[in-house]
Amino acid sequence: MSILESLELALKNIVASKTRTLLTMLGIIIGVAAVIVIVGLGNGLEQYVTDSFSDMGTNTLTVTVMSRGATRTMDVDDMYEIVEENSQYLDLCSPTANMMGYVKIGSETTTSTSILGVSEDYLDIAGVSVASGRGLQYSDMATRSKVCVIGAYLDRAYFGGNAVGQTLRVGGTSLTIVGVLEQQDEDLEEGGSDDCLYLPYTTASRISGEVSSYVITMRDEDYMDESVNALESALYDFFESDDYYTVTSMAEMLETMTSMINILVGVLAGIAAISLVVGGIGIMNIMLVSVTERTREIGIRKSLGAKERYIMQQFVIEAACTSALGGIIGILMGDGLSIAASQVVTRVMGESLTVAPTVGSVLMAFGISVGIGILFGYLPAKKAAGLDPIDALHYD
């Protein structure tokens, strides 16, 4: 008997017992669909995190000064000097001063606006463009000018799109708006990326305290390790200790986040794959029942000269077909659930997150489903092939 004949006979037996076959495939269907959705969710999360970090700039290093140091005090000029001395690795530098408080516009007060003191290079580092007016300039830092640039949300919500030249107050200090940034998010909303205000770090330091962190760009991300080592070495030489600063790389944070997501997805996919094993046990159970039900048929075929390998081939192919059919249905269900999950997550979270299973994950799930069918179909097939034809013919 050829493989094609065995395949045709297997499909006939499957069609003849539709309900039993569907129930048998249920574990495979659920397992394959679950694996596809979970892997797709992991891919979506990884892409979302990558995009988020890309917006912040994966070529940036953040230096946080936690203490003044034992013998020396670091000021902005010291950090600029360190960057200049390591210019083969480091490029732009912006001191940053986080400001706590509210922005007062006329008689209204905003409670969620992000207020940050920065240098003239910060907008270039962050990859943000000015839509109208101008950005911050070196002269603003040198003269501690009371100016600022604001996000598109503040411009539209409080100034009707005509913010340039208007004034607002931060920490009791009146600032003149010299520029409005381009819109970053699709929707303008309170507390979003467009609800922000940047002023010269020198002005921010005078209003609310000191510069405690710096954002520095690398000239080449391919030399990230060398850039980090050069910066840390210079800081260690300055403080004579590594207790007073931390250097954080966005690229390293992205790599760590991606690794954590992959581990989580792997664990969840492994748990979902248990359904495939359960489905395989179900296939083995049904195939054993099928062997019992078709004992006389097996006896007749053997008495007519059918070899054991043909009998085994017949039952293995039937188990594989059952499992493969369940895998195909599971793939279709997984793709449908992935599309639905993308829409649900986007609506619930308000973030664009695409649950996107890869071709590799689909092929892997299908291959595993077929492999499970063959693996768990082997024992019933071996039992069928080993039946004594005389005993089989006398079986009632």
Image (cartoon, helix red, strand yellow):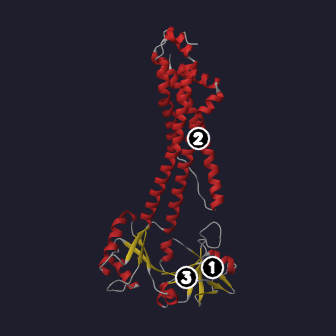
Q: Nearer the viewer, mark 3 or mark 2?
A: 2
Residue 387 screen position, x and y as percent? 48, 15
Residue 133, picture quadrant: bottom right
Question: Are the two marked residues, 1 and 3, in contact with CB atoms closer than 8 angstroms?
Answer: no
Whichever of callouts 1 and 2 sits on the residue coming sooner in the sequence is: 2
Secondary element at tag 1? loop
Secondary element at tag 3? loop
Query: Residue drawn at (51%, 41%), measured in percent from left and top?
Result: 274
Q: Nearer the viewer, mark 1 or mark 2?
A: 2
Query: Residue drawn at (49%, 65%), measured in percent from left and top?
Result: 53
**Residue 366 visible in the picture:** no
Residue 131, picture quadrant: bottom right
Q: Neighbour class for label 3 at 10 Å: few (<14), some, many (≥20)?
A: few
Residue 23 screen position, x and y as percent? 62, 33
**Residue 152 visible in the picture:** yes
Q: Which disc, if any, is residue 30? A: 2
Secondary element at tag 2? helix
Q: Which disc, if any, is residue 111? A: 1
Instruction: Tell me how far mark 3 sits from mark 2, CA to CA.
Output: 51 Å
Residue 367 screen position, x and y as percent? 49, 36
Residue 245 screen position, x and y as percent? 38, 76
Q: Neighbour class for label 2 at 10 Å: few (<14), some, many (≥20)?
A: many
Whichever of callouts 1 and 3 sits on the residue coming sooner in the sequence is: 3
Q: Is residue 188 left or right of residue 97?
A: right
Q: Is residue 59 left or right of residue 153?
A: left
Q: Residue furthest front?
A: 396
Instruction: Tell me how far mark 1 sits from mark 3, CA to CA.
Output: 10 Å
Q: Which disc, if any, is residue 100? A: 3
Q: Amino acid at mark 1?
A: Thr
Instruction: Tell me how far mark 1 sits from mark 2, CA to CA.
Output: 47 Å
Question: Are the two marked residues, 3 and 2, in contact with CB atoms closer than 8 angstroms?
Answer: no
